[in-house]
Amino acid sequence: MPEASAWNAARAREIIAEHALLEGPMLPILHALQEEFGHVSADAVPLVADALNLSRAEVHGVVSFYHDFRAHPCGSHVLKLCRGEACQSMGSEALAESALAKLGVGWHGTTRDGELTVEPVYCLGLCATSPSALLDGEPIGRLDEAKLAEAIEEVRGR
């Protein structure tokens, strides 16, 4: 994953201005802010609201509705474990519980070394290969504990 920049209000205003004239600009702005800073800071919400003539509540509602937007910085790598019905039927809940316990984090948590953030996702569309996950955007199917541990070790360089 690309390294995120530290929060910078001036840069955030530039990003907002770059996207403000697009049709339906809120999602492109929020995606661009998250790409730049690794999350959508609470400090960004009033800037977006002012630029789009919306209330802060409306912007916050969009940020909090979509699971892909983060309110806090994430780790260097992001693991998204599928919790959809097909994956649940193939053991994803037990796999997730085991992975979270081994990593010492909860959902949306980041390991102490800042290397890995674990997030739930509700269907990746990889039902035929469930249980599945995305690790730094790369799909992994037919997961078991060993395969997941190997994938995590690989991205963490261990």
Image (cartoon, rainbow, N blue to C red):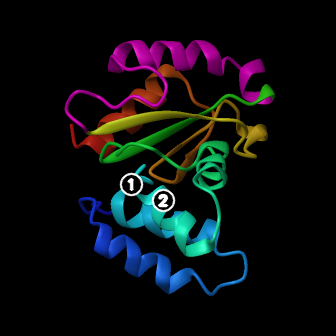
Tell whether 97 sits left or right of 102. right
In depth, the one of 39 and 117 nearer the eye is 39
Amino acid type, mark 1: Asp
Classify mark 1: helix, strand or loop: loop
| Quadrant position of residue 146 | top left
The quarter in which the N terminus is drawn is bottom left
Which residue lies at the image location 66% right of the left edge and 30% below the top edge?
A: 131
In depth, the one of 139 and 113 nearer the eye is 113
Q: Which mark is residue 17?
A: none
Res 86 seen here: yes
Q: Residues within 10 Å of mark 1 (few under 14, many from 20)?
A: few
Q: Position of residue 89 (x, y in %)?
A: 78, 19
Residue 106 magenta: yes
Residue 49 magenta: no
Which region is colored magenta? 86-114
In depth, the one of 60 and 66 nearer the eye is 60
Q: Which residue is mark 2?
A: 46
Q: Position of residue 95 (x, y in %)?
A: 55, 18
Tell whether 140 sits left or right of 155. right
Q: Which residue is mark 1?
A: 43
Q: Is there CB contact under 8 Å for labels 1 and 2? A: yes
Q: Position of residue 58 (x, y in %)?
A: 67, 53
Classify mark 2: helix, strand or loop: helix
Up-down: is 104 above or below 29?
Answer: above
Q: Position of residue 19 (x, y in %)?
A: 55, 81
Amino acid type, mark 2: Pro
